Amino acid sequence: MFSATSRYANTPTAVLQLPDGRTVTYVRRRFPPDPDALTTLSLHAVAPGERLDHIAAQELGDPEQAWRIADAHRILAPATLTERPGRRLRITLPEGIPQGPNILDPGGGLGG
């Protein structure tokens, strides 16, 4: 249903039977992962005027992966991540891809 790189790739679907007999398949709600469970690959300092999709393109090779950066910061309004130049953003592996302890913070608890 979704590409392998979509934030919804592993989100289950459900079926709703309407009173008129029609069946509607829909995607269940996606819950963002616990940021502390994500492996940090790098940190990115936000430049003035930078957008999250540009950061994703630079750091992850795909502007459509901006959702991964938002997940790493438990943010629902992604534009807030780039409002303050100099803010350091965690660039992480997607949920479910372990790579041992966080590369930049082996003790865990890296703040954002």
Image: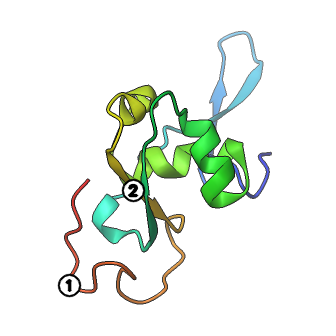
Q: Toward which corner of the image does residue 44 lie, by quadrant? A: bottom left
Q: At x 53% / y 68%, what residue is drawn?
A: 93
On the question of residue 7 being in view, the answer is no
In this view, the residue in front, 68 or 59, is: 59
Q: How many marks?
A: 2
Q: Would you say 61 lies left or right of 51 here?
A: right
Q: Amino acid at mark 2?
A: Pro
Q: Nearer the viewer, residue 22 or 30?
A: 30
- Residue at 61 percent of width and 49 percent of height: 56
Residue at numbered disc 2: 33
Residue most toward the top? 20
Instruction: Pick out the residue farthest to the bottom.
Output: 100
Percent across and percent down for residue 108 are: 23, 77
Element at badge 1?
loop
Residue 51 shows in the view:
yes
Helix, strand or loop at label 2? It is loop
Which of the 4 image quarters holds residue 90? Answer: bottom left
Q: Is residue 98 above or below residue 81?
A: below
Quarter of the figure with residue 64: top right
In terms of sequence position, does the residue under pointer 2 or pointer 1 come before the other?
2
Residue identifier under label 1: 107
Q: Nearer the viewer, mark 2 or mark 1?
A: 1
